[in-house]
């Protein structure tokens, strides 16, 4: 246990924190904090199992992860109620201006949803966005409250890092086992896409790796106790990079390349991060060559879906869906056609445009897209100031902040060519990592300086979150028993491959 925690054990705010942080206080905290603590542990276990354990033999990974995401968001609401109603006070994480701008975006989205062709699905998409904001808010709030106690939030950081390492290790084990099974099955064919299990599509696998890979470098860059795991982290990074290359997900390569270029301009630690990942990627390329070329050739095996086939400048039919999104954005510039409503316009390619900004502009309007762009750019600008100020630090918190920034930058870059903001597992982790990063921003120095939300604002926000989760839960309960019939109806009406959006069959036209 950190000495700073022991030294601060008399502080009333720290005294009320969940006992996972201060186990000696387990007999003094209320039952609500005890239950909240158990639910936080359950939430992390849930997140860990979504890509590693198949709940149902006949279910799509996408649908499982959507149900798991909604379950996680429901846990967020319950944890918030237990932690902040009659217990901890919710800190204000953003400036007053930014809070009102976010409210304006949500209200405009509500009006757009009301006017949409399929308002229930539109409000479902809005509820998903609001509930994801709730997850980011909860993680940021708890992380901020721990930070102001001068404990650096190390326990939270390490628990989240351990969760991420566990998931990546599990995916690597599945990858290796699948490869060995393919080598021994005697069919003479090695299908690269069958090696990246746990997701309905290799692109979704790549989206998660885009978010996870930057943080795997933490033990290799810091000073302190976590340095002892540097060798394990180094091996894991190379293997995860190998899986990312084998998946053939160009968006992952692009996102991490952009993150490397940005961090290389931040300072010495950023350049070390960039060099480390370039080296790991090169080692991954060599391993991929051995696994997908040398060994199969030796065993006289053919390789399907080789990553080398993705080394093209082809848009992979994105020009069709981008053109459609641009057309809708220009035809409905003020409020767009409504959240999720691009899925109401079948195009034979996808239920979303694989381009976050075009999707936002088409579905929620150009003013909303520009406003959100300003909020993101403004937030990244403030983050860069902090990163530059700590560019020489190898302290744990500063290195984690740097790696979190790389994750967010890489994911936002990939979102310009892929559905990072649409797929359930990447949505879940993007919200979690964004909240973690916001909670680490050094805006206050002590518990006396921290600003708290009024009870009226908190309960209004809680009511909105409860409403959002209630609608999502209703949609899951309504649709889950009939997912098979939905897919059959889609096949009869439109034919072709499934186009994921909310569900694996994501086209909502005539549903």
Image (cartoon, rainbow, N blue to C red):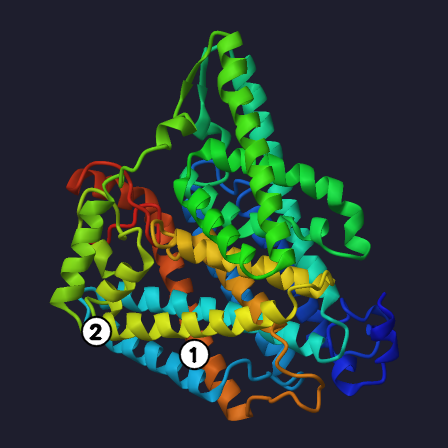
Residue that label 2 marks: 335
Give the total of numbered labels: 2
In the image, is residue 460 above or below residue 366?
below
Q: Residue at x 55, y 23 (%)?
A: 179
Q: Is residue 184 visible?
A: yes
Q: Residue at x 45, y 50 (%)?
A: 255
In the image, is residue 348 above or below residue 138?
above
In the image, is residue 141 above or below residue 168?
below
Which secondary structure lies at badge 1? helix
Say whether marks 1 and 2 touch (CB < 8 Å): no
Q: In this image, 3 relative to 63: left or right?
A: right
- First in sequence, mark 1 or 2: give its number: 2
Q: Is residue 79 visible?
A: no
Could you say where residue 448 lies in the image, as x and y percent from the top left?
70, 91
Could you say where residue 148 lies in the image, as x and y percent from the top left?
71, 80
Q: Toward the viewer: 214 or 321? A: 214
The mark lying in front, picked from 1 and 2, is 2
Which quadrant does the N terminus fall into? bottom right
Which residue is the extreme one toward the left? Answer: 331
Quadrant for residue 251, please give it. Answer: top left
Q: Residue at x 52, y 65 (%)?
A: 434
Residue that label 1 marks: 464
């Amino acid at each position: 246990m950190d000495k700073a925690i022991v030294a601060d054990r008399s502080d009333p705010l720290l005294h009320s924190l969940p006992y996972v942080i201060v186990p000696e206080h387990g007999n003094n905290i209320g039952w609500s904090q005890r239950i909240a603590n158990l639910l936080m542990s359950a939430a992390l276990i849930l997140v860990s199992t979504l890509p590693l354990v198949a709940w149902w033999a006949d279910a799509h990974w996408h649908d499982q992860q959507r149900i798991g995401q909604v379950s996680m968001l429901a846990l967020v609401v319950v944890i918030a109620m237990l932690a902040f109603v009659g217990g901890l006070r919710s800190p204000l994480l953003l400036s007053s201006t930014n809070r009102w701008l976010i409210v304006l975006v949500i209200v405009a989205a509500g009006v757009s949803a009301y006017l949409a062709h399929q308002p229930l699905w539109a409000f479902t998409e809005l509820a998903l966005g609001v509930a994801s904001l709730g997850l980011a808010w909860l993680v940021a709030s708890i992380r901020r409250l721990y930070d102001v106690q001068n404990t650096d939030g190390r326990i939270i950081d390490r628990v989240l890092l351990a969760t991420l390492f566990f998931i990546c290790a599990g995916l690597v084990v599945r990858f290796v086992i699948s490869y060995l099974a393919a080598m021994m099955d005697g069919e003479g064919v090695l299908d690269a896409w069958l090696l990246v299990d746990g997701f309905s599509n290799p692109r979704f696998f790549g989206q998660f790796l885009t978010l996870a890979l930057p943080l795997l470098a933490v033990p290799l860059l810091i000073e302190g106790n976590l340095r002892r795991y540097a060798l394990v982290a180094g091996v894991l990074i190379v293997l995860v990079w190998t899986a990312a290359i084998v998946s053939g997900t160009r968006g992952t390569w692009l996102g991490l390349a952009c993150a490397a270029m940005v961090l290389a301009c931040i300072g010495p630690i950023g350049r070390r991060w960039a060099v480390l990942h370039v080296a790991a990627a090169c080692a991954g390329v060599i391993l991929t060559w051995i696994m997908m070329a040398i060994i199969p050739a030796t065993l006289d095996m053919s390789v399907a879906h080789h990553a080398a086939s993705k080394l093209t400048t082809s848009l992979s039919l994105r020009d069709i869906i981008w053109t459609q999104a641009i057309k809708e954005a220009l035809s409905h510039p003020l409020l767009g056609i409504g959240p999720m409503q691009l899925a109401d316009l079948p195009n034979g390619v996808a239920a979303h445009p694989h381009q976050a900004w075009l999707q936002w502009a088409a579905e929620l309007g150009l003013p909303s897209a520009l406003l959100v762009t300003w909020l993101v750019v403004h937030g990244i600008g403030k983050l860069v100031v902090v990163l530059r100020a700590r560019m020489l630090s190898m302290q744990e918190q500063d290195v984690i902040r740097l790696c979190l920034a790389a994750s967010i930058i890489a994911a936002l870059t990939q979102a310009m060519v892929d559905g990072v903001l649409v797929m359930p597992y990447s949505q879940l982790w993007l919200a979690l990592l964004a909240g973690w990063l916001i909670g680490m921003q050094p805006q206050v120095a002590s518990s006396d300086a921290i600003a708290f939300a009024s009870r009226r604002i908190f309960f209004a926000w809680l009511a909105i979150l409860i409403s959002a989760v209630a609608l999502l839960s209703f949609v899951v309960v309504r649709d889950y028993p009939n997912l098979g019939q939905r897919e059959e109806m889609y096949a009869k009406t439109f034919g072709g491959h499934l186009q994921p959006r909310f569900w694996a069959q994501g086209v909502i036209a005539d549903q």
